[in-house]
Image (spheres, rainbow, N blue to C red):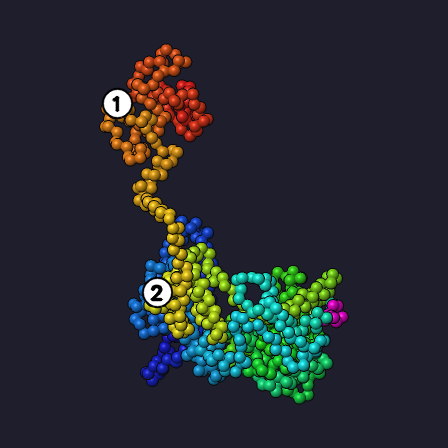
Amino acid sequence: MPPPSPPPTPGGDPTPAQPTPASAHISALISSLALGARAASSLHTADSFAFHASFPAFSRLSQAAQGQAERLLEELSSAASFASSCEPASARAAALERSAAADPERWDQCADVIEALLDAACEQLSPATGARGPARAAAALLAQGAAASSGMPKPQKAYTFAAVDNSRRAPFVPRVPAGKPHAAEPLELKPAPGHGLAGVAEDEGRVVAPAHHYGHPYLPEIRGLQFQPFQLDAPPPLPATGLGGTLHPVDALDRRTGFLSHEGAALVETEADLARLSRRLAGPGVREIAVDLEHHSHRSFAGFTCLIQLSVRPSPAPPASGDLIDAANDFVIDALSLRRSIPSLLAPAFADPSIVKVMHGADSDVLWLQRDFGIYVVNLFDTYRSSRLLGYPARSLKHLLERHAGYAADKSRQLADWRERPLPPALLSYARGDTHFLLDVYDRVRRELGERGDGSARQVLEDSRAVCLRRYEAEPFWTDGWRSLLRAGDGLSPRQEACLSALWDWRDQLARDRDESPGYVCPGQALVRVSRQLPTKLGGLLAAFNPVPPLVDEQKEVMLAAIAASAEAAAPAPAPAPPPGRPPRTPISITTSADSISQLRASASPFSFKPADGDGGDAAAEGGAPPPPKPAGGRAVMSPVLGTEQLYKQAGWLSSPSNLSAPSNLPASAESPRHSPDEEVVVAAGNRGGSTSDYPGHSIEGRGVALGGGGGGEAGRRS
């Protein structure tokens, strides 16, 4: 909310309220989102929620949260109508019903709304990003939270990237700079049969990939690399601040933020500066280079490198020229504006086997350098591999810097939009921090490896060699990749699965053709929603989106056609016609009535109750009503209400005394019962001689005779 107006001036007129800077509003928004994410992560899972819900206090809190969620849905519905169209809020409210607050699909729509609002805000701020001032800082903060703003032109067009072929069958062709720097063998690119995808069988039917591939251009150089002695030996004892003086920094920190200052880093934005940096890297004093990259994957199918950060050790004697390129040790290279110059000017240093390239978690960086610049890394030391071998409790760069440099890195800008130009100071400081400490940390790690005395340093270098041998390949298309969009418990019918598969194929093909990220074309969960609903008209299709992505609005007719075609393909095939001369089979009548099904189950069960005698004479003899007629088919129907005695008679466990004949082994006094059935329960002849162990679980006691289970043979026996 805006700050209160200042008090009136002595002249009596109130001082006009100054507008709150946009950066303050956006900072508050980012803080609120962070608090919301933290609160969401602390919610009880499905396993424990039911237990906690049994407590009244928790139940009251849950109900209050439900009310807040419903109000939030109403607010988001109103915001969506404002952000995406001029429709009244009531027209959009149908898509976010209050009664559906517990539906995860509705919250997916909320996420779509928030992303659209962030994109719209960034579009409004983008014209001001070229001017220095609060607007640029506000845009940077917004990009930090959104991670993928769409308010700026695509760099592929703004910087005239070379045309890229994203088609599924097109192989990646390495673009090695002319002459192949530091070549041990001349460059010879010949296509090899098969897609060449690592870990994927050539006959894998689920993948659509090129029919041939190209080998690694620097395979002989990387395999033949001989490590230098200093790489295998532990360094001598190190000063507290490291050989480069970067550890435990004080003077290099920004007093206001506590993070590394951007002062002293050289921002390389021109080809002339890049050429001078290339000459410095080729000088005799450079033995190691710390390297990191900043990458962006929004609004691009394959993604692209935005920044390259390099750090070298300080020169023994400062240069007399005072030029920043010659004096600086940290360099941030604009990989967008210098995309065409980087291959020829930086590839020699990366391919030089005498220079150790120090990187942390280089698996992706090595592939991005190959894809974007034709740069291949020879001689790598990956500090992530050393952290794993040394058994550190965490292997992130942040932990490594805290452990060895005493520096708590600012990781709040990990998701920043690195396309932004000019680069804000906060992003420049963050980028510098990824390599500024890395060479001194590398020394500390090598010393720990050497002290183990078991060849650990060589093992890290061999593991790093394997990273360099990785080869970039274009993204294949997995025909069943749509299954990755489903969450635990999501169940789709065959028609819905066919629809999701068709939309998955459509989205991938469109993203490749337009060089867009699949998520920009259409969010994955939106594809799942459409597949569940199976719309047949434009209104139903667009109702699944809030707001409607631009390419979905453009391709809505194509999507409807794909949905209809998938439904037709998934329809069950008609039954084959009977052979000539054979009469058609008579269809079987299937009972669907609940009462009929229950009756059939009761009559078919081995425990269904049937009269002891076939004519129901007991009931008539006792003066009761005549038995009801038997249903067709001769099946007995269990009476819905029976007394205890009638129940056991109908079960066949008891008979009336008049129908009994006393066995010969009973005493004479027992041959002619003197009591009426109301006074004594008599065992049916067919049930005498049984044992309670044969029929457990039943016990009946009369006034004169006790029965166990199925009618025990001894008086007084009980189960």
Q: Identify which residue, 467 or 436, lies in the foreground.
A: 467
**Residue 122 placement (x, y as % from top left):** 44, 76
Residue at 44% over, 57% down: 490
Q: Position of residue 341 (x, y in %)?
A: 60, 83
**Image quadrant in which the N terminus is located:** bottom left
490 relative to 406 in the view: left or right: left
Q: Residue furthest right?
A: 229
Q: Nearer the viewer, residue 674 or 216?
A: 216
- The secondary structure type at the circle numbered 1 is helix
Seen in the picture, residue 23 relative to 680 is either above or below; the reply is: below
Assign a secondary structure to mark 2. loop
Expressed as whole percent of the image width and height from the top left, the position of residue 507 reads 45, 69
Q: Is residue 638 above or below residue 163?
A: above
Which residue lies at the image location 43% right of the left edge and 61% below the top edge?
A: 498
Distance of label 2 from label 1 (alpha carbons) = 69 Å
Tell me which segment is drawn in magenta: 225-233
Q: Residue at x 36, y 64 (%)?
A: 535
In this figure, which residue is indicated by the disc labeled 2?
536
Of tags 2 and 1, the one toward the viewer is 2
The residue positioned farthest toward the front in the image shown: 581
Whether tag 2 and tag 1 are in contact, CB under 8 A, the answer is no
Q: Position of residue 234 (x, y in %)?
A: 74, 67
Instruction: Please state which amino acid type lies under the numbered disc 2.
Output: Thr
| Quadrant position of residue 666 | top left
Dividing the image into 4 quarters, which one contains the C terminus? top left
- Residue at the (41%, 61%) spot, across then down: 569
Tell me, yes or no, whether the highlighted magenta stretch contains residue 465: no
Q: Look at mark 1 in the image and give the residue it sits on.
A: 621
Can residue 411 be spotted in the picture?
no
Mark found first going from the N terminus, 2 or 1? 2
- Magenta stretch encompasses residue 232: yes
